[in-house]
Amino acid sequence: MIDLHTHSLLSDGLLLPSELARRAEEKGYRVIGITDHVDASNMEFIISGLLKACKDINKNWKIKVIPGVELTHMPIESIKAAVKFVRSKGVKLVLVHGETLNEPVIPGTNRAALLSGADILTHPGLISLEDAKLAAGKGVCLEISARQGHCLTNGHVAKVSRAAGAKLVINSDSHSPGDLITNGLANKILLGAGLDKKDAAASLKNSENLACRLLDIKRLM
């Protein structure tokens, strides 16, 4: 399993980065992205601690941890500059919290995220075909979510992404140990969203390809 959207207690998760990584490794994960919620108030604090933890984990354990952030509920005018800033601080994986039906996300966040240089637009809600085509053109992955509430529009996201040619990934959006999903469950969620077996497999492969690019390796061992 490769999961590129999880949260530690540096934001609103329950576990330290090391414990989260250990739990994931025990569950058979090869790669995990720790992508804590940030805005202008806490970027530097979270990035500093997360980079240290990821460096220590990657030096000593088989599982690979990618330091990331999820830009969350930010003014849309600030998203592009925030992406540039966190990358300048050494963050590898940048997510933007999309327009889920489960929260009052500012309309226009999806489009701002797609134009910002982010890697993944998470739980993009009722994303338009136009924005899905923009995602395809920009190489931004759209997320199928395993998280309660955010998963309400998985079927729509899958359908629109397929029509637009946008890449999909599936993530747990884990906040606690029980949120971590297996590869088997991830595949079932993708099929449940309306993808066929070929497209479900392609979504899992998209996560692997993105992880390899961010880790600067040709393939995972």
Image (cartoon, rainbow, N blue to C red):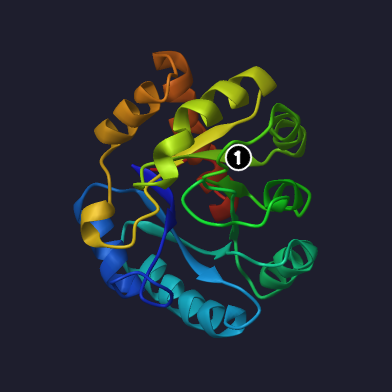
Residue 35: x and y in percent read 49, 63
Q: Position of residue 141 (x, y in %)?
A: 60, 39
The residue at 54%/82% (across/down) is: 48
Observer-nearest of 56 and 184 = 184
| Quadrant hosting residue 59 | bottom left
The residue shown at (40%, 53%) is: 173
Please count the marks in the image. 1
Residue 72 position within the rendered picture, expressed as x and y whole percent measured from the top left? 58, 64
Image side of residue 74 versus residue 156, left or right: right
Q: Is residue 55 left or right of residue 121?
A: left
Q: Which residue is mark 1?
A: 141
* Residue 137 vs residue 74, the one in the foreground: 74
Who's the residue at 47% across and 75% down the image?
Answer: 50
Q: Mark 1 Cα within 10 Å, few/some/many (few <14, many 20+)?
A: many
Q: Is residue 160 left or right of residue 221?
A: right
Q: Amino acid at mark 1?
A: Cys
Q: Residue furthest front?
A: 104
For this rendering, which residue is in front, 45 or 156? 156
Quadrant location of the C terminus in the rendered image: top left
Circle 1 sits in a helix, a strand or a loop, which is it?
strand
Whether 122 is drawn above or below 138: the answer is below
Residue drawn at the location 74% of the way across and 29% of the way down:
133
Res. 125 image quadrant:
top right
Looking at the image, residue 67 sits to the left or right of residue 9; the answer is right
Point out the image quarter for the N terminus: top left
